[in-house]
């Protein structure tokens, strides 16, 4: 394995971590539109918190897929063909979620409720099925010597992957309502705090179940025991910190902590995969390795130079955008009837 191959494996992990940190709260806020808000004014208030940033946040997912295509084409080919149906469901969720922002804004009240529900459902579909995909991937899939999947329903949907999907769904929801508590004022902010304080107790139970299934249904403890234990401890630790800071009323720290919980989950997955990119349940010799899945050294070199040139501008723009829209969003005022 060369340095550039290792570098791009890490960079793809960083892109997915950035995606879950930034777009994760978008999904949480989208789900909160139907679970946290009590009226249309509160729903508008929630949508306004992510209105300026949600589409830019999704670029991280597109960039991660593009980077995987360019740097690890064999990983990309096997992953996207093997998870074709699940990725189509994720794409459908992204589409109905994306169009709902525009349609709800320009629709009269009866139709507007349809798009509120479309936003909530689309926001739930994406993290759940991403969790199914990533967690079933670390469980191991029936991949043959040519990198082809021969998977059935229960290879995708097993105890570990379903628990992982639900856990990721809950993590993004909590990340979203922590963002709501950070970015809003009024009743919806207080309600977000109360929801978070309660739901973290459910999350702890889910994290324990996930950790036990991970230990017994994957080879993580055999391949990277120290890294696995450290990341599991960090996942729980950041969750506890997020709940404690929610109780204390420190919204920014709670939001960063819930985001770092998602980042730790991504790091756990990539540590467990290393030095593989896909795990074969048929035979370990059929697992796809980093060194076998990558592009040529020349391609990786060109990509590295281009990334070093462009990444500072992307990060600067992202920071600038969040700084510009840093103020809290109040509930829209309802005009008096004369």
Image: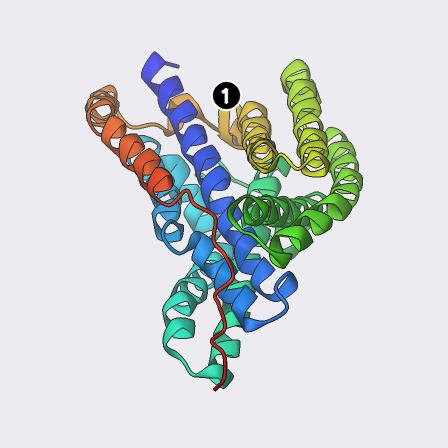
Q: Answer above or below: position of 100 versus 113.
A: above
Q: Quadrant of the N terminus?
A: top left
Which residue is the extreme one toward the front?
338
**Residue 70, image x and y in percent?**
28, 35
Front-lying residue, 213 or 191: 191
Front-lying residue, 300 or 268: 268
Which of the 4 image quarters holds residue 57?
Answer: top left
Front-lying residue, 312 or 226: 312
Colour scheme of the picture: rainbow
**Residue 71, image x and y in percent?**
31, 31
Q: Is residue 281 visible?
A: no
Q: Secondary structure at mark 1?
A: loop
Q: Answer above or below: position of 212 versus 113.
A: above
**Residue 161, image x and y in percent?**
66, 46
Residue 11 horizontal side relative to residue 171, left or right:
left
Mark 1 neighbour class, 10 Å CA radius: few under 14, some 14 to 19, many 20 or more: some
Residue topped by disc 1: 275
Residue at position x 40%, y 51% from top? 54
Residue at position x 71%, y 51% from top? 195
Q: Answer above or below: position of 224 versus 66.
A: above
**Residue 263, image x and y in percent?**
54, 31
**Disc count in the image?**
1
Q: Is residue 289 visible?
A: yes
Front-lying residue, 262 or 138: 262
């Amino acid at each position: 394995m060369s340095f550039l191959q290792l570098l791009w494996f890490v960079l793809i992990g960083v892109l997915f971590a950035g995606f879950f940190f930034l777009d994760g709260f978008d999904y949480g806020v989208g789900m909160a539109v139907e679970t946290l808000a009590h009226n249309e004014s509160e729903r508008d208030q929630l949508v306004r918190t992510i209105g300026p940033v949600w589409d830019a946040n999704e670029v991280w997912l597109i960039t991660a897929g593009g980077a995987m295509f360019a740097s690890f084409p064999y990983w990309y080919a096997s992953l996207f063909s093997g998870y074709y149906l699940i990725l189509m469901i994720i794409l459908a969720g992204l589409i109905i979620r994306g169009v709902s922002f525009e349609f709800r804004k320009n629709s009269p009240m009866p139709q507007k409720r349809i798009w509120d529900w479309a936003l909530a459902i689309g926001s739930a579909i994406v993290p759940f099925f991403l969790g199914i995909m990533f967690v079933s991937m670390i469980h191991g899939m029936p991949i043959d010597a040519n990198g082809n999947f021969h998977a059935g329903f229960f290879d995708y949907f097993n105890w570990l992957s379903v628990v992982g999907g639900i856990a990721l769904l809950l993590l993004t929801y909590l990340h979203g309502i922590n963002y709501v508590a950070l970015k809003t004022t009024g009743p919806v902010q207080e309600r977000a705090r109360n929801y978070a304080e309660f739901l973290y107790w459910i999350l702890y139970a889910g994290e324990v179940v996930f950790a036990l299934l991970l230990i017994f249904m994957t080879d993580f403890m055999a391949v990277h025991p120290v890294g696995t234990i450290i990341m599991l401890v960090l996942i729980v630790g950041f969750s506890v910190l997020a709940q404690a800071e929610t109780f204390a009323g420190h919204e920014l720290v709670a939001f960063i902590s819930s985001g770092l919980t998602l980042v730790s989950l991504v790091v756990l997955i990539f540590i467990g995969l290393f030095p593989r990119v896909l795990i074969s349940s048929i035979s370990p010799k059929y697992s796809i390795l980093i060194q076998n899945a990558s592009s040529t050294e020349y391609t990786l070199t060109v990509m590295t130079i281009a990334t070093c040139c462009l990444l500072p501008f992307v990060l600067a723009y992202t920071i600038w955008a969040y700084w510009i829209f840093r103020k809290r969003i109040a509930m829209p005022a309802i005009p008096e009837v004369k």
